[in-house]
Amino acid sequence: MVVLSPSLLSLPTLHFFRYDPGSNGSGMLSHKNSNYSRKFHEKIRVCCGIASKPTSQNMLWRRDLLLFALSSSLSTLFPSSGCLAEDDKRMTSLVDEINAYTYSYPVELPSKKFLFKWVESRKPERYSSAAPLSPDARLRIVSERVDIVDNLIISVSIGPPNIQFLKSKDKKTWAAKDVADSVLSDKSALRVTSSQRMSESSVLDAHASEIDGEQYWYYEYLVRKSPTRSAEESNLYRHYVASTAEREGYLYSLSASTISKQWTKMGPLLEQTVSSFRLLAPTDNYVPPYKDPWRFW
């Protein structure tokens, strides 16, 4: 069961990311196109559906490229708000009882009359039936939502630790950078080695924090989304922030991203989404990742 509870929240910005401005958490440019954006949102509604289950590993890669192409075109035709880190933002909480976690994400900025265009591309599902992120199917997406117009992706993945980076079973000894490397080494739809997968990513910052007795690892990284290795344009990179926690021998990770040129506008909101990620006490609806690994429905 998935519970969406809209609420008027003003989540505190946790300044743990590299690009934190260090003052009031906004660090944003002033908005000069609010009238244009208002007219756009009064006249245009963009709806998008993405298949919940790809037929092959390559469809995950194609999905990212398609999202990048569509959002780049739409953002050129219909520019979004310049400053989105507003105090009166409206957030909605998602509670996934199947995998026992929750997080909040932005849905509206009332003062800017700005609405996010989220589409639930993958409804929460059990680990055994979730879409794999790599050929070995270790890391899998258990839920995902996208906003194509503003080029945003929020996804939750689950997978076992990579012993190449996390050799100890005592999670209190794990360094945040090693946790990030463990997750990123399994996060690729291409048939490449772990080191090749990691070369696609560049970790900018990582640290750990204990919240309510639970250890969370936070990290920020860039991922090259260009089909070639020669292009250097900044908009060929996706800028990610992520949070990971461990339960019963599996890593639960929430990542939020946008293209680099959108980071100044969207980054602070994505950081607040990541900082809201929490593991929940399991209910009767909870399905641990190790249960019925053969089941795909």
Image (cartoon, rainbow, N blue to C red):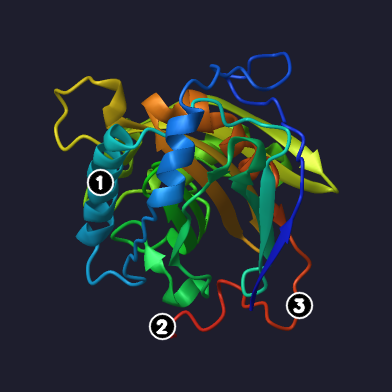
Could you tell me if the residues under marks 3 and 1 are in contact, i.e. CB atoms within 8 Å? no
Give the residue displayed 39% in from the left and 50% down from the top.
Answer: 43
Where residue 30 sits: x, y (%)?
55, 17
Residue highlighted by disc 3: 283
Give the residue displayed 61% in from the left and 47% down from the top.
Answer: 108
Residue highlighted by disc 2: 296
Residue type, label 3 = Thr
Q: Earlier in the sequence, mark 2 or mark 1?
A: 1
Could you tell me if the residues under marks 2 and 1 are in contact, i.e. CB atoms within 8 Å? no
Answer whether residue 268 is visible to the viewer in this image: yes
Could you tell me if the residues under marks 3 and 2 are in contact, i.e. CB atoms within 8 Å? no
Q: Earlier in the sequence, mark 3 or mark 2?
A: 3
Q: Residues within 10 Å of mark 2 (few under 14, many from 20)?
A: few
Comparing 134 with 274, the one in front is: 274
Alpha carbon of mark 2 to alpha carbon of mark 1: how far?
31 Å
Residue type, label 1 = Leu
Report whether 4 appears left or right of 261: right
Looking at the image, is mark 3 or mark 1 nearer the viewer? 1
